[in-house]
Amino acid sequence: MASLLPLISELLPMVMPAATQVIRAGDLAPTGPTVEGPVTQRRAVVGKCGMCATVLTIRPKHSTSIRHNSEQDTIMYSIAGSSTVRVKEGFEDELHVHELATGDFIFIPAWTEHQVCNGSDQQDAVWLVVQHGSHPVGAELADWGGAVTATHD
């Protein structure tokens, strides 16, 4: 019986009806810095499959907290603006700095500490964030390698 489970999980999508979902840009747009704060993250597609997508908006001269996405690998795509992505990599805990512009991608492996900074004086930095899980998870840290200050699950 257990040997049938992989087969069933592959056949079900072919015989069960599925529905598409459209998420309009207007539903994701931040309403303003005084209402939302300097960094907003809006869920776009979650709970539909083994991946999820959010839109991360960083106001000028602001940064995300230092964070990691727990067990989820993450691909980020720059929709607008330019950003500096700081990543703590390797066993030596080296801090790497990546300058990214509109149209650039970055892959961030699971458990990798990172921070996205918008150094612009005027333009928002907007990112599409795709994580390997049906809902985004992760943790905000007090500092590089520091204590967890908040979790997201």
Image: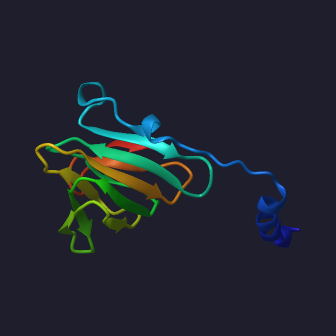
The answer, for residue 150, to whether it is visible in the render is yes
* Rendering quarter of residue 14: bottom right
Q: Residue at x 50, y 41 (%)?
A: 24
Q: Residue at x 36, y 60 (%)?
A: 77
Q: Residue at x 80, y 51 (%)?
A: 17
- Residue occupying the far right of the picture: 1
Left/right placement of residue 120 relative to residue 56 reads left
Left/right placement of residue 50 relative to residue 13 reads left
| Of residues 101 and 49, the one drawn nearer to the viewer in this rendering | 101
* Rendering quarter of residue 21: top right
Instruction: Please state the horizontal and vertical placement of residue 53, each as a whole percent of the image.
Output: 48, 51
The answer, for residue 147, to whether it is visible in the render is no
* Rendering quarter of residue 152: top left
**Above/below status of 34 relative to 124:** above
Left/right placement of residue 127 relative to residue 46 reads left
Display colour scheme: rainbow
Quadrant where the N terminus is found in the figure: bottom right
Q: Residue at x 29, y 59 (%)?
A: 113
- Residue occupying the far top of the picture: 35
Instruction: Please state the horizontal and vertical placement of residue 119, each as a whole percent of the image.
Output: 13, 50
